Image (cartoon, rainbow, N blue to C red):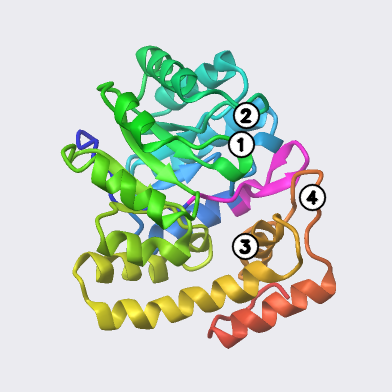
């Protein structure tokens, strides 16, 4: 893993749970193999889609160990270490390093919103002591602060900071990042929302951290490759499928958790893993589950766990 420039589709993996403080281990193992079989270029665990902030530290450490050992260097593994406690972030990073992960990912500390200079100081101090390279994670809807382009430019001067994942869904902002980082060709800029990934890659992004790749990894890999090679006919066709998934599976219910419930439900219906949700959220009930089943069948997928 000598190449630190990470590109392609790096799915933000859901965390298959057996109950509130245990993993669905058979489901986890099946899900990892399912995702890797789609040709993805990496795997991101303990992010927003992984419900990291709802999991105990014990469970997060177990997940890091199990996933890194199963992947076994087949693709880069990125590990989320976002936390309000710097000490706990470092403990997670040390575990990731010990298990052979490639990099760690950190959103700004949440609860009290830091100023931009505080973000610069925080990330540069964090990068000084991390045992692995660092990806920044721009997620303003969840942490109440945006990593401004000039702030990114300052933080990225640190040699241990190698990329940024942007989940803002703000393409004007993302294009500003591309512009301000254009002289740093080895710095990875990844986009979170799958609905925007093809556009972003066409205009200079390095790839996508797309939740739908838990369910349909090869779809998003094919989309990325088509955008990278500027095959616009294929991009336009695949974008229709991606938007159908977004406007159907992710829109059942009216809450912010609907996307995650939809992904977990679909993975359960496909026979991959449990759809148990960490509290305070609950898995879909029978009527919503039936709607997800109908969507999967419309897409041509076989439901094995109705």
Q: Residues within 10 Å of mark 2 (few under 14, many from 20)?
A: some
* Contact (Cβ within 8 Å) of mark 4 with mark 3: no
Mark toward the start of the polypeptide (2 vs 3): 2
Q: Are marks 2 and 4 in contact (CB under 8 Å)?
A: no
Give the number of the mark in front: 1 or 2. 1
Image height check: is 19 above or below 272? above
Residue drawn where x is 61% and y is 32% of the image? 60
Q: On the rendered image, what quadrant is the C terminus found in? A: bottom right
Q: Secondary structure at mark 3?
A: helix
**171 vs 93: above or below:** below
Q: CA distance from mark 3 to mark 1?
A: 25 Å
Q: Nearer the viewer, residue 229 or 22?
A: 229
Query: Disc 1 or disc 4, which is closer to the eye?
Result: 1
Query: What residue is shown with label 1?
Result: 144
Tell me which numbered mark, 1 or 2, is placed earlier along the sequence. 2
Cβ atoms at labels 1 and 2 below 8 Å apart: yes
Q: Is residue 19 magenta?
A: yes
* CA–CA distance in space, label 4 to label 3: 14 Å
- Mark identifier at residue 263: 3
Q: Earlier in the sequence, mark 4 or mark 3?
A: 3
Residue 279, above or below 152: below
Residue 181 in the image, given as x and y percentages of width and height = 24, 40
Which residue does the numbered mark 2 point to in the structure image? 110
Q: Which residue is mark 4?
A: 281
Which residue appears at 67% of the width and 70% of the height? 251
**Residue 8 appears anywhere in the view:** no
Report how far apart the C-alphas of labels 2 and 4 lie in the structure: 20 Å
SS at badge 2? loop
């Amino acid at each position: 893993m000598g190449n630190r420039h990470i590109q392609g589709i790096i799915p933000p993996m859901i965390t298959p749970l057996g109950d509130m403080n245990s993993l669905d281990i058979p489901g986890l193992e099946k899900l990892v193999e399912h995702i890797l079989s789609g040709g993805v270029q990496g795997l991101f665990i303990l992010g927003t889609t992984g419900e990291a902030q709802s999991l105990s530290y014990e469970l997060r450490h177990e997940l890091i160990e199990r996933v890194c050992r199963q992947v076994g260097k087949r693709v880069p593994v990125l590990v989320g270490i976002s936390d309000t406690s710097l000490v706990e972030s470092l403990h997670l990073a040390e575990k990731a390093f010990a298990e052979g992960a490639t990099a760690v990912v950190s959103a700004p500390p949440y609860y009290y919103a830091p100023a931009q200079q505080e973000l610069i100081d925080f990330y540069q101090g964090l990068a000084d002591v991390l045992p692995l390279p660092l990806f920044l994670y721009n997620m303003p809807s969840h942490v109440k602060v945006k990593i401004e382009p000039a702030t990114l430019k300052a933080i990225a001067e640190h040699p241990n900071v190698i990329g940024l994942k942007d989940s803002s869904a703000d393409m004007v902002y993302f294009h500003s990042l591309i512009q301000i980082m254009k002289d740093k060709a080895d710095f990875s800029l990844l986009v979170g929302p799958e609905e925007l990934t093809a556009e972003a890659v066409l205009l200079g992004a390095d790839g996508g951290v797309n939740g739908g790749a838990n369910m349909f990894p090869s779809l998003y890999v094919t989309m990325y490759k088509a955008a990278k090679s500027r095959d616009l006919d294929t991009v336009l066709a695949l974008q229709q499928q991606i938007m159908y998934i977004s406007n159907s599976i992710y829109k059942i219910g009216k809450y912010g958790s609907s996307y995650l419930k939809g992904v977990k439900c679909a993975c359960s219906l496909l026979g991959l893993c449990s759809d148990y949700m960490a509290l305070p959220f609950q898995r879909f009930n029978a009527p919503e589950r039936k709607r997800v089943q109908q969507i999967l069948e419309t897409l041509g997928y076989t439901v094995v766990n109705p």
